[in-house]
Every structure is written in C-alpha cells, then in structure tokens.
Amino acid sequence: MPSPRSYNTSFPSAEALFYSCTTSSTSAEDLDMHYIPPSKSSLRIGVIILSQDQTQMVDFAALDLLTMVGRNRLNKLNASPAALEDSLDEIDVRYVTASGEGSFPVSSGGRIPVTNSFQNAPQFDILLIPGSFSTTPLPPSATLFLNCQCARPNLIAIISIVSGILHLAQTGICNERRAAAPRSLLPALKQRFPEISWRSTPWERHDKLWSSNSAVSALDMMRTFMREYFWDRSAAVECALDAVGIGKLDECE
C-alpha cells in the first residue's frame, strides 16, 4: 500500500508579512516576500555637507524625527514603558565635510559644528544628504567618499532631502534608479542625468535610495522609513510620530 503523500507547505515569516502589509511601495521588487532582519539597537548617521553655501535648516526636520526613537529623546516625552523598551540605545549623528574643520552655515543664520572629514569619517549606517543652494560640481573626493560608503553591504539607507539629490546624482549612485526631486529642478535634471529615472512624486524609494521633492514630503518619507526599518520597535516609532503630530497624518480628523 503506497504511503500517503506528504505536503511541505511553506508560509512567509511574520517579518515578511509585516513588510508586505505595511510598505507603501507598489513595485514588484519591494513587494517580494523576503526576510527582514531585526533593526539595530544603535545607529550611526552621517549628514554629508557637500557645499559651502547655506544648507536649508528645514531639511534637518527629517533627521530630527529619526533621532526621536533614541532613548534619550523618548525619556523626555514621558514615553510608555513599551516605547522605552523599543527605543534605540544610541543614535550617533556626525556632520561631515571635505575638510572636517569649523562649522557650516544654515539658512536660519546659524552654524552647525563639523565633526568629521571625508578622511576620518567612520562607516555609517545611514547617509543623509540635505539640500543647499549650490550648483557647483562635486569634487572627486566627495564622489569617492560617497561611493565607498554606499558600496558597503551593511548600509541601511541613503536619504536625499530635496535638492540634495543634485549632489547625489553626480556620483553615479542614482543611475538606473528611481528618484524624486524638486519640481523646479526636474527639467534640468532629466536633461543632465538621463540615466536616472526621475519621478514627479512627493518622494521615491528604490532599494536603499530614498529621495524627496520637498522638506514636507521628506517627513512623510521618513515616517515610512521608520515604520519599515523599525518594524520590531513599533511602540517607540509611534510614540515619536505622535509626539510631532504625524502619527496619523494619513487619516482625517
């Protein structure tokens, strides 16, 4: 008598189901089921300043939102025990320029101290490229630095804020990828960098590259990034989002 047929049914993991149900992307590559590892308990973020001109202060709003999942920040928000349990142990933010000296100007009239140069900067988990008023070509040292950082398999994300994409596009990192940019820059960018798939959407995500067309849409982009990457720290993420009033931005009140 033949033995009964056995069936080996494979189900997606809880992590894969969470990603599929929460990602805002509709591309086939992003909807593929795949294992999502636990988020890191500490992050090293590199804010790369690529111009001597003023950097838009509002471009740092998305960075500030991201750092709110750190334990030091949540402690000041009277966060719940669950949120504190989910919070990150440490978020180390470095401000990097070519020289690594002095400070750089921001549009509000202030200045932010520089912490590292291209030569002594550590390897970062996240790169953030803010916008500026400069159209100056990138020096070879900046292109080399960014490509070396982005070539690391452990890099979590490259986040371009508004006109920061103009700097990033010059490095070749965005080639054959989707990217968002300020609408006023799109015609020139399409002509200058035809190898990039430019979109007029508020923000775009292609693999590890995240880009936005405005500082406001960058907050929505960062909210999505936080919910996706920190899938296992939802209490901390929602506490941070609620604290700044965008936890339910997509709902009518």
Image (tube, rainbow, N blue to C red):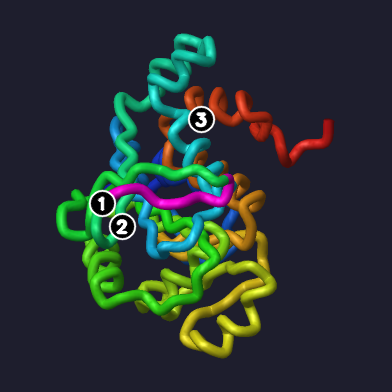
At 30% from the left and 30% from the top, the residue drawn is 41
Circle 2 is placed at which residue position?
A: 97
Q: Main secondary structure of the magenta part?
A: loop
The magenta-colored residue range is: 101-108
At 49% from the left and 80% from the top, the residue drawn is 196
Helix, strand or loop for disc 2 = strand
At 49% from the left and 68% from the top, the residue drawn is 165
Vertical placement of 54 versus 73: above or below?
Answer: below
Instruction: Determine contact: label 3, label 1, CB under 8 Å.
Output: no
Residue 23 on image: x %, y %: 55, 50
Helix, strand or loop for disc 3 = helix
How far, Cα to Cα, is label 1 from label 2?
Answer: 8 Å
Instruction: Determine contact: label 2, label 3, CB under 8 Å.
Output: no
Circle 3 is placed at which residue position?
A: 237
Residue 30 visible: no
Instruction: Determine contact: label 1, label 2, CB under 8 Å.
Output: yes
Q: Could you tell which of marks 2 and 3 lies nearer the N-terminus? A: 2
Vertical placement of 235 versus 121: above or below?
Answer: above
How far, Cα to Cα, is label 3 from label 1?
Answer: 34 Å
User: Which label lies toward us, 1 or 2?
Assistant: 1
Residue 106 sits inside the magenta stretch: yes
Residue 100 on image: x %, y %: 25, 53
The mark found on residue 173 in the picture is none
Residue 209 on image: x %, y %: 44, 62
Q: Amino acid at mark 1?
A: Glu
